[in-house]
Amino acid sequence: MNLLLKNIKQLLTLKGPECPRTGKELSDIGIIKNALLYIESGRIKYFGKESEVIEKIMDKKFEEIDADGIVMPSFVDSHTHTIFAKPRLKDFQMRTSGMSYQEIKKNGGGINRSVEDIRNSTKEEIIGFSLKNLKRFIECGTLSLEIKSGYGLDFENEVKILEVI
C-alpha cells in the first residue's frame, strides 16, 4: 500500500551534520515547511516541499492522510525498565540534591525500593501503572522500545513482570 502524508505544515527531518551537534546546531531540526511525505511499500520514498514531491508521484496510486500539522520521526528507546510499581520520585529528588546512591539506599530508596514495591503489588496494579508509563512514552514520541524486567529479583516476581510485559 502506498501512502501520501499531506498538509504537513512542518516536516522535522533532523537532517544535519554527521557528527554530534553542539551549541546552536542543537536547535536545527531540519524543518521543511509545507511538505509532503510519500511512502511506497512501507518505506519512505520521497519527502520534501509539496511542489518537488508532487512531480515525482503524479502517476502513482496512493491513499492520502491529512497530517494537519507537524510530522516528525519517532524515537527508539532500546533500554527501559518500564514495568515497575511506583515511581522513585523521592530518589530523583535526593539525587538532584547531591546525595550519593549509598545515601539514597540508606534513606529507603534505590533498586531495593523498586523490588519491594513489585513484590507488594498485584499483577493488575502493575499493569495499570505500566500502561500509564507506556502512554507517556507515546505522548513523548517514543514508538519503539525494549522493556526489561529486573525488579523482581526472584523467580516468582520476575515471572510476574514478564507476564505484565
Image (spheres, grey):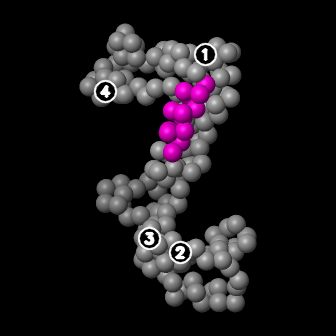
Q: Is residue 156 above or below residue 7?
A: above
Confirm or deny contact between disc 2 and disc 1 (CB under 8 A): no
Q: Is residue 115 visible?
A: no
How far apart in space, not on screen, are marks 4 and 1 (Cα)?
25 Å
Residue receiving disc 4: 93
Residue drawn where x is 53% and y is 42% of the image: 134
Task: Find disc 1 in the rendering and name its residue.
Answer: 153
Residue depicted at 55% across the width and 28% down the height: 126
Amino acid beneath label 4 = Gln
Spatial CA span between label 3 and label 1: 45 Å
Residue 90, position as x, y percentages in the image: 34, 23
Q: Mark 3: which secondary structure? A: strand
Query: Looking at the picture, which amino acid does disc 1 mark?
Result: Leu
Q: Which residue is mark 2?
A: 66
Residue under the image location 54 percent in, 39 percent down? 131
Residue displayed at 37% across by 9% down = 106
Between marks 4 and 2 in the image, the one whose residue lies nearer the viewer = 2
Q: Estimate the x, y position of residue 142 in percent, counting from the top left.
A: 52, 49
Q: What amino acid is found at the position of numbered circle 2 in the picture?
A: Asp
Q: What residue would you read off at disc 3?
A: 69
Where is the N terminus found, in terms of image quarters?
bottom right
Relative depth, front residue between 137 and 94 = 137
For residue 26, side relative to residue 134 (left or right): left
Where disc 1 sits, the SS reads loop
| Chief SS of the magenta region | helix
Quarter of the image for residue 32 reads bottom left
